[in-house]
Amino acid sequence: MTGTTLPAPRAPFRPQTLIPYAVLVLATLPILVLYVWLTYSSFFPRIEGFRPVGPFTLENWRFLWDPGSVDQLRNKPAIIPLTINTFLFAISTSVVVVLISSMAGYALSRLPFPGRRMFLGGVLLLHSFPSVTLLIATFIVLRQLGLYDRLLGVILVKAAFELPFGVWIMKGFFDTVPWELEMAALVDGASRLRTWWRIVMPLVKPGLLALGILTFVQGWNEFILPFVFMPSGSQQTLSTFVRAILGEGRFVDYGLLTAVGLYYVAPVLVLFVVAQDQLMRVYAGGVKG
């Protein structure tokens, strides 16, 4: 019969093709079980031996609308101001790191200035230092600048610690941009700054988004810097709020801890789900150079 097409033959089933999926299921199943258990436990008054006990209740979630419902946290601000502080800290850190890293990464990728390789080695060396080893020196600098116990000071410190990673990531993305595109723009009379902004930056947009997301997550999860350099309650973040719930570790309200923990990780989980495609591209741009 003319005008008909035969369906393509189906590939034979191979049991070994199920191995990657089985590995993924085994790797993600404990994490899924953990989040299901946390969600379930947050609606019970207490936990005994990893088993929720008592009637179903919303008492653990009262911190969302009743700031004074938790006795040990009465000296803390309400959850909404702490959430705003955390968002400002994470977003501001991300913006500063992306802006400076995009310029520094471009210069390291395109400009053959003297000492370039030594500078790259220094950036890598700085990234290898744990931030906790620099707390005393950072404390002295913040006190001298009048930025101690201020959110702006902690934002600048966090951005400085994240910049070496950001510079290396953006240099890798700039290395993937063909040099011929910039040469054509420069020959047409465009300045170096205009070429960077109008020609190169749109091509490395995946890298900018990936770096911004990763830096935001790092800022959102940061605990040491806000805890050490912002001792006053009005300037602290959600990570210090979770630490206050733990208290001395002897009388922990685990029901409340599960509820606040879910509230704390929810924005990051949503961000990873929405931006997972952009995050995967960081490996394509960050391995070259």
Image (cartoon, rainbow, N blue to C red):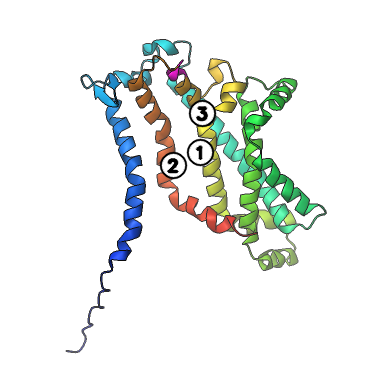
Q: Residue furthest front?
A: 49
As displayed, is residue 138 above or below residue 6? above
Residue shown at the point (51%, 28%) measured from the top left: 86
Q: Earlier in the sequence, mark 1 or mark 3?
A: 3
The image quadrant of residue 72 is top left
SS label for mark 3: helix
Residue carrying label 1 = 217
Q: Which residues are magenta?
A: 244-248
Residue shown at the point (61%, 30%) measured from the top left: 155
Residue shown at the point (54%, 37%) measured from the top left: 218
Q: Earlier in the sequence, mark 2 or mark 1?
A: 1
Side of 65 relative to 231 (left or right): left
- Is residue 107 visible in the rendered image? The answer is yes
- Marks 1/3 in contact by CB < 8 Å: the verdict is no
Residue shown at the point (70%, 57%) measured from the top left: 109
- Marks 3/2 in contact by CB < 8 Å: the verdict is no
Side of 268 relative to 254 (left or right): right
- Amino acid under disc 2: Leu
Side of 237 relative to 197 (left or right): left
* Image x and y of residue 46, in percent: 29, 19
Residue carrying label 2 = 271
- Marks 2/1 in contact by CB < 8 Å: the verdict is yes
* Image x and y of residue 182, in percent: 69, 63
User: Looking at the figure, which quarter contains the N terminus?
Assistant: bottom left
Residue carrying label 3 = 86
Helix, strand or loop for the magenta stretch, by majority: helix
C-alpha span from label 2 to label 1: 9 Å
Q: Earlier in the sequence, mark 3 or mark 2?
A: 3
SS label for mark 1: helix
Foreground pick, 88 / 115: 115
- Amino acid under disc 1: Val
